[in-house]
Amino acid sequence: MLRKRIIPCLDVRDGKVTKGINFAGNRDIADPVELAKFYSDNGADELVFYDITASAEGRKLFTDVLSVVASTVFIPLTVGGGIRTLGDFDRVLKCGADKVSVNSGAISDKTLIRRAAERYGSQCVVISADVSLIGGKYTVFGRGGRDDTGMDAIEWIRFCVGEGAGEVVVNSIDTDGVKKGFDLKMLETVCEAVSVPVVASGGAGSCEDFIELFKTLPKVDAGLAASVFHYKEIAVPELKKRLRESGIPVRL
Amino acid sequence: MVAVVDYGVGNLFSLQCSLKAVGTQTVLTSDCDALREAEKIILPGVGAFGDAAAKLRESGLFDAIRREAAAGKPILGICLGMQLLFEKSFEFGEFDGLGLIKGEVRPIAEVIPEGFKIPHIGWNELRFKPHPLFKELREGDCVYFVHSFYGADCPSVIATTDYGAELTAAVADGNVMGCQFHPEKSGKVGLSILRAFCEL
């Protein structure tokens, strides 16, 4: 039986992982290679690396880090952030990414997913969508959740899968950072709309939230989170143990 | 020295890194002579069967791999590389493979129940027979799969995985071996399989 995947997400800026803002208001950073190895050794099923740098030097640092991670950690790696062209796909795939996640790049260039899927295969192309409920309609946002595109999120995700995206990551803007559980209603709507794997993101605050996610929505394939893992509020081995005790198939 | 066959499909960076991690010297090559000189051969691959088979033929690697297999050299096909070892594939048409493993490659859609997603992506458990490749494997070990086609009608299956149906996960016929999953992406379990191949 296919195992449910647990995916820590690492935001990388200037070659370092940004864990978030700590209570003293300082930006907390970590070494991406060390952190990736820690997660891999502790049962993470996959890692997502998100490039949040804007500068060309930052991009270079990011791919350098990615290469080192890929030669240290032997689990699937997904890379996102600033993917706008096939050249960007090429750049990160050559450095060891297995899957490439597109978000705003797919919104500004509606042909990107099709062209990428034709060249690299659907298994390599992930559509990541930032979604919020606006006036009763699930709406997709661009530019890291800043731009309301006005587009219906479910239609958008369906379009992307039709174009060849092989996996969907849905980030709920409404539950992100709240730590009171995933956006189950929105995720259910997405699961009903597409037949490719769905990765839930946004809202995890405890092991119970993951148990509820997989129990309520058996069609969800994976759960993704960042700071709750980075700050060890949830330890992956403990999470997996709890999931297994709840009858959810996981890799131990 | 292990030769990793480079015929222009797929990303070989991770595979090379994983082989280095198990202490193996590799050469990435599309040269038939290099295959002859290597102690072992790994045939990787992602993408479509027809294209890959055509590329192997154009480069002369098709015959070179068959020749090395006949000479008894250990060969490991990975993912599409495993499927290429089969006699034929029905992925978007009908194509001849290397014919080193009996059987044919068919869509998993033909055997899995409705409601199971295609491709089969993620970590799944291996049900395996004793084989030198699996000497470090334990019951319940999982490996990482990404595929929409599988090896059917094959008498050389040494491991399967359950995805609503029993799918071929690994094959072996003497010196010719293949795994449908990605050992280079399957953590410690995957590395143990690569190490076992390199130590054969």
Image (spheres, coloured by chain):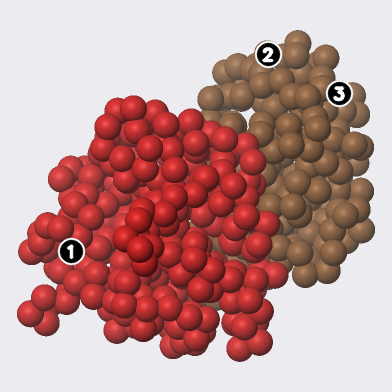
Residue that lies at the very extreme toward the top in this rendered image: B33
Q: Name the residue located 87 percent from the left edge and 28 percent from the top edge.
A: B73
Residue B31, labelled with which disc?
A: 2
**Closer to the camera, A77 or B70?**
A77
User: In the rendered image, what is the letter of the chain coloured red?
Assistant: A
The residues tagged by marks 1 and 2 sit, at their Cα atoms, a distance apart of 49 Å
Q: Viewer-nearest of labels 1 and 2?
A: 1
Tag 2: amino acid: Asp
Choose top left, top right, bottom left or bottom right for residue A178.
bottom left
Three-letter amino acid code at the position of disc 1: Val
SS label for mark 1: strand
| Image quarter (top left, top right, bottom left or bottom right) of the C terminus of chain A | bottom right
Residue at the spot x=63%, y=76% of the render? A238
Residue A242 visible somewhere in the drawing: yes
Q: Toward the viewer: A221 or B60?
A: A221
Residue under label 3: B39
Q: Is residue B143 above or below residue B100?
A: below
